[in-house]
Image (spheres, rainbow, N blue to C red):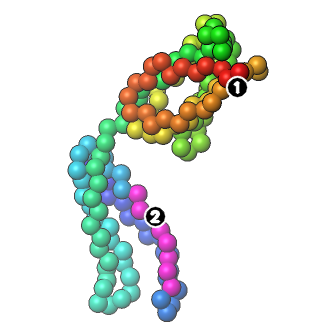
Amino acid sequence: MLDNQSDETNSPVAPGGGTTNFTVVFDPAAVGSSSATLTIANDDPDENPYDFAIRGAGIVSTNVSVSGRVSTPAGLGLRNAIVSITDSQGVRRTATTTSFGFYNFDEVASGRNYVVTVSSRRYRFASRPLLINDNVSNLDFVAQE
C-alpha cells in the first residue's frame, strides 16, 4: 500500500523554455517491490498531464545496537571517553565509556550510514564511517600514540 499524496504547490516555469527543479521522494509503505505514478499538471494542451512511472523497493528498517570497547595504546580500558555516533543527517548521539572502556548504543536505525568517533582528554582516535545493517559488537577503538 502506498501513501497517496497531493501537493498543489505552484512552481511556475518561466515562459520560453525555462526550468524548475524539484525533488521526488518515493517511500513505499510496504516491504518489497512497489510502483506509483507521478502526475504533473501543466498548460500544454497536447502533453497535459505529464505522467511518470516510478518503481522502488520498500525495505524493513529495524533498530539495532552498536557496542564496543575503547582502550589505551597498552590495551587498558579507557573510562569516561565520549563515543559519538552521527547519522548522515547530522543527528548525533553520545555514550560515555564505563570504567573498563565499554560503550553501547541501543535503538540505532539500520540501513543507514554513520560516523563513529571517540574523544578523550588524553588520547586521539581515528573516526570510523559505517553502513549499519545489523547489530555491531566489538567496534573497538585503540588510542593512537
Residue 136 drawn above or below residue 43:
above
Q: Is 94 colored magenta in this rendering?
A: no
Amino acid type, label 1? Arg
Q: Residue 12 appears at what percent x and percent y?
A: 50, 80
Label 1 crowd bin: few (<14), some (14–19), many (20+), radius 10 Å: some
Q: Residue at x 65, y 10 (%)?
A: 74
Q: Quadrant of residue 24?
A: bottom left
Along the line of sight, the residue nearer the viewer: 13 or 108: 108
Q: Residue 11 appears at what percent x and percent y?
A: 50, 75
Labels 1 & 2 near each other (Cβ < 8 A): no
Query: What residue would you read off at disc 1?
Result: 124
Q: Residue at x 60, y 32 (%)?
A: 127
Q: Residue at x 45, y 37 (%)?
A: 131
Which image quadrant: the C terminus? Answer: top right
Badge 1 element: loop
Residue 102 drawn above or below residue 115:
above
Label 2 crowd bin: few (<14), some (14–19), many (20+), radius 10 Å: few
Amino acid type, label 2? Thr
Q: Residue at x 66, y 20 (%)?
A: 143
Badge 2 element: loop
Residue at the limit of the structure toward the bottom, as seen here:
16
Q: Residue 71 appears at what percent x and percent y?
A: 62, 14
Query: What residue would you read off at disc 2?
Result: 23
Residue 93 drawn above or below residue 120:
below
Disc 1 and disc 2: Cα gap in Å?
A: 40 Å
Task: Say if residue 95 shows up in the picture.
Answer: no
Q: Which residues are magenta?
A: 18-25
Magenta stretch prevailing secondary structure: loop
| Left-right relation of 102 to 133 | right
